[in-house]
Image: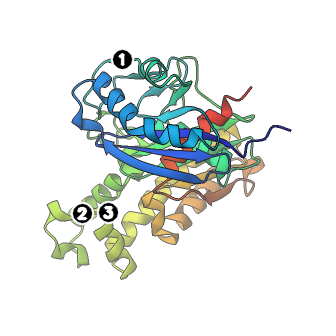
Amino acid sequence: MIDLSNEFAIGIDIGGTNTKWGIVNHRGDITEKGELKTDGYPTIESFVDKLYETLSPIIQRHATIGKIKGIGIGAPNGNFYTGTIEYAPNLHWKGIIPLTKLVTARFSLPSLLTNDANAAAVGEMMYGAARGMKDFIMITLGTGVGSGIVANGSVIYGHDGFAGELGHTIIRPGGRKHWSTDLVGSLEAYCSATGIVLSAMELLEQSTADSLLRQFAPETIDSKKVYECAVQGDAIAKEAYRFTGQILGEALANFVMFSSPESIILFGGVIKAGDLIMQPTKEHMEKNVLPIFRNKIKLIFSELKEADAAILGASALVWEMRD
């Protein structure tokens, strides 16, 4: 049996503003972590140099007690096949960035890259609620809607490395226009935190009913305020969540019939609304699947700590590349 007790992986999560990193063992324990500004470096080379400068002494310390197996990276528009970040809209480095080539050369360690949602799915399979599962879908509901699809124990990357963009599937043809993609009627336009706010605003405009939300200037209303008003029983805020849950449930029904997962794992700030969103989600998912799928698919929450999930997901890529 292979002894993993003295092996470590580096997990790096690159976001538009901050990059988080952690040293992780095979159990998912983060022994050390930190972050640096993503947007503080004019070139990708200077960013990788700063990563190396930051992590090199930490790698050396860990070398005295074990072995660093490699580096896993989650990033927007990260391509697992090529190791490149391609035209990421929220990074200031433009075009195609050969990230794993640069990181491997600088650190002299093997590195793997995928997008942040796929990394979350791998992390859930390695450390979280999907342990032992071979077929599941991970849906991240936050400022955007991300997803990772696992079938037969493997992440579905597609022919070009970009499969699994379920958040951008069109679930309301002719519906709401997305604020950055310009797609019309996409899941993210409705079921992200931004989408919930837009739904609440539309409901306020369509109704003259009293609402706690009317005490706020429209430009100050965020998903937290909508949630707080819903918890206090505000009808319009509650309807915003019910409507969001309906759309999410209808979309999940389509996803179920596509890959027949054992479970759908939900992650992110939006699900903190609990039954406000989960009851309509479950109801409309079950209502819109064929009888052969009904009451068979578990809707469960991620078991990864939100603050550490991206690091854990990225680090899990390293264990996946084991011979």
Q: Position of residue 82 (x, y in %)?
A: 51, 17
User: What is the distance, in whole Å, between disc 3 and disc 1 at their CAs?
Assistant: 34 Å
Position of residue 262 in the picture relative to residue 58 (left or right): right
- Outermost residue toward the right? 1
Residues 65 and 235: in front is: 65
Mark 3: give few (<14), some (14-19) or many (20+) Cα within 10 Å. many
Quadrant the N terminus occupies? top right
Residues 241 and 149: in front is: 149
Label 1: which secondary element: strand
Say which amino acid is labelled 1. Ile
Position of residue 197 in the picture relative to residue 205 (left or right): right
For disc 1, the marked residue is 96
Callout in the foreground (2, 1): 1
Q: Position of residue 132 (x, y in %)?
A: 77, 48
Of the numbered discs 3 and 1, the one sitting upstream in the chain is 1
User: What is the distance, in whole Å, between disc 3 and disc 2 at their CAs?
Assistant: 19 Å
Q: Position of residue 17 (x, y in %)?
A: 28, 43
For disc 3, the marked residue is 223
Say which amino acid is labelled 2. Gln
Indicate how the structure is coloured in the image.
rainbow
Of the numbered discs 3 and 2, the one sitting upstream in the chain is 2
Residues 50 and 57: in front is: 57
Say which amino acid is labelled 3. Ser
Callout in the foreground (3, 1): 1
For disc 2, the marked residue is 206
Mark 2: give few (<14), some (14-19) or many (20+) Cα within 10 Å. few
Q: Residue at x 51, y 37 (%)?
A: 60
Of the numbered discs 2 and 1, the one sitting upstream in the chain is 1
- Outermost residue toward the bottom? 232
